[in-house]
Image: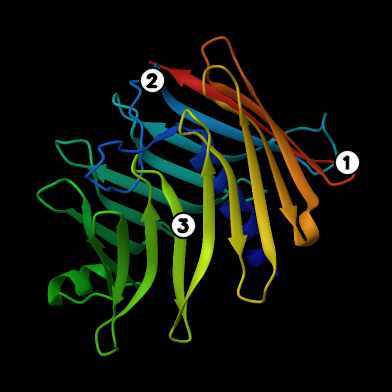
Amino acid sequence: MFKVKYLYLISFLLFLMLLVLPNCNKNKEENQKVLPTEAKKNPSYQKAMIYEFKFGTMDSIGLLSSESKYDSLGNEVESIHYLEDGTIFVKYVSRYDSLNRITEKLEYNKSGNIHEKVNIFYDLNGNLSEEIYKTGEDLDYMDKIGAENKTIKYYYTQVKLFRKVEIKGKRSKIIEEIEYDSLGNKIKDYSEEDGKRRLSSEYVYDKGNKLIESILYLYNGDIGKWIWKYNKNGDEVEMREFKRNNKLNFYKYLIYNEDNLLVEQKAFNSIDEPKFVVKYFYEYH
């Protein structure tokens, strides 16, 4: 139960970080459908630390929940996540090529050993083409014998992307189909379950190509919905989450400093009770 609780917490904080540090851009070339990539902003900071303040206590002492390090191009090169007692829960390391594309991701467990390794490859057009996953306690041996757990391959058409998982000794299958509009915005997700293709998500954008609504269709018939708002700089300032019957479940506000860096998130439940506060601190070059 302890591990499940903190895995949920870390996963949620990673979701928050992906939304805001840094902002995401999509490729807008009409005929080249690529996965969204993080914008490289040449930030003035080289390290970001996230402190979480306990649920329902806005003025409590914050606990360091994660810290991230960035290179001079704004790429996140290391991310460490902590448990409440200050010990490391998991660490991620990312490596990039000369074209500023991520080529390798490493996950270290709390003992400091590599638990998972992902090698990433691109085609001649720069589109993501393949991800090779290796997971286990002895990755050096797996590298030596050329073993791998699974491979995810990406196939593109004019308006669609297909993610196909291949596991040795098992039948390969398409696990996701993504549909784009003429501007390269992802507008629909399809997944395959029990051999059947079904719509799993839809996305709506404003005139500035900012994501303003996302709808998730669960296998059991439930529907989840998220709505975003932005300031004049294009930064996310509010997000609302709705569950079954369009009932508000959760919302949060985001606050920025004079340098347009995110400094605080405040989250509340459906009856306006505080859930948590996350504060961001930066170390500058």
| Residue 59 placement: quadrant | top right
Q: Is residue 1 left or right of residue 218?
A: right
Residue 144: horizontal and vertical position, in percent?
14, 72
Q: Mark 2 — residue?
A: 43
Dot 3, how many residues are within 10 Å of its Cα: few (below 14), some (14-19), or many (20+)? Answer: some
Judged from this view, the residue extending furthest toward the left is 124
Q: In this orientation, which residue lies closer to the viewer: 264 or 68?
A: 264
63 versus 73 height, above or below: below
Q: Is residue 3 left or right of residue 60?
A: left
Label annotation for residue 273: 1
Nearest to viewer (mark 2 / mark 3): 3
Q: Measuring 51% from the left and 22% from the top, which residue is drawn there? A: 282
Q: Measuring 34% from the left and 43% from the top, which residue is drawn there? A: 184
Q: Mark 3 — residue?
A: 188
| Secondary structure beneath label 2 | loop
In the picture, the quarter occupied by the N terminus is: bottom right
Q: In this orientation, which residue lies closer to the viewer: 199 or 119?
A: 199
Name which residue type carries label 1.
Glu
| Secondary structure beneath label 1 | loop
279 versus 26 height, above or below: above
| Distance (Cα) linking label 2 and label 3 | 32 Å
Q: Is residue 131 visible?
A: no
| Distance (Cα) linking label 3 and label 1 | 33 Å
Name which residue type carries label 2.
Pro
| Secondary structure beneath label 3 | strand
92 versus 118 height, above or below: above
